[in-house]
Image (tube, rainbow, N blue to C red):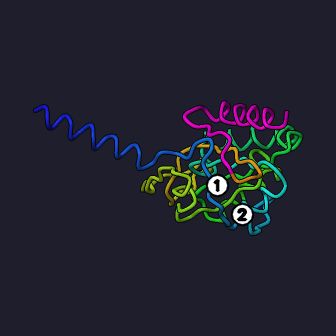
Amino acid sequence: MHKYLIGFVVSAVFAVSAFAALEAGDDAPKFTARASLAGEPFDYALEDGLAEGTVVVYFYPSAYTKGCNIQAHEFSVRMEEFNAAGATVVGVSLDNIERLNDFSADPEYCAGNLAVASDESGAIARSFGLEVRDAVEGAKDTRGVDIGHGFAERTTFIVTSDGKIAETVGGVSPFENVELSLQAVQRLSE
């Protein structure tokens, strides 16, 4: 029986480490993606964002879902504070660009203040060490529209202009995620 317990523990460790989010000091994977700001699609490159300063890269499960709506709204209304600390913000999800065009322009959520990028395959999320769950059949968003895509875990990375991760914020509520991210960029700007 003891050897089975050891096997279970070893399997559990590998399962956890397979999706260990990148941490402070790690290099942030450079990525490009189709993104949207105020309903207008464009090509986003992390490298271009880093040329301007710190970038807050936040991954979220899906546009138009309860927690993601809250988080997008909070980032949007606090964008001036992030910018004052020398940071830009980009959200990343597995939503397609059409959904993100709507979400980025929606006055209740991104309100034209927050760029959101499409990672339909989940490759960007995985490159940051995040777990990507499969789509849930029949899942609908807060508008009643089918979601139809997988979900990345809610995690935010504070990436400094040298391409290094300064902090990783995860496992907290959408409100806390934004607040802790803002505190991190403010510390960096001191």
Q: Amino acid at mark 2?
A: Ala
Tag 2 residue: 35
Dividing the image into 4 quarters, which one contains the C terminus?
top right
Q: Amino acid at mark 1?
A: Val
Quote the CA–CA distance across marks 2 and 1. 9 Å
Q: Residue at x 72, y 31 (%)?
A: 179
Tag 1 residue: 92
Residue 26 placement (x, y as % from top left): 60, 48
Residue 120 in view: yes
SS category of the residue bearing label 1: strand
Query: In this orientation, which residue lies closer to the viewer: 139 or 12?
Result: 12
Q: Residue at x 69, y 32 (%)?
A: 180
Dividing the image into 4 quarters, which one contains the N terminus?
top left
Query: In this orientation, which residue lies closer to the viewer: 154 or 69?
Result: 154
Of callouts 2 and 1, which one flags the residue occurring earlier in the amino acid sequence?
2
**Residue that protrudes farthest toward the left in the picture:** 1
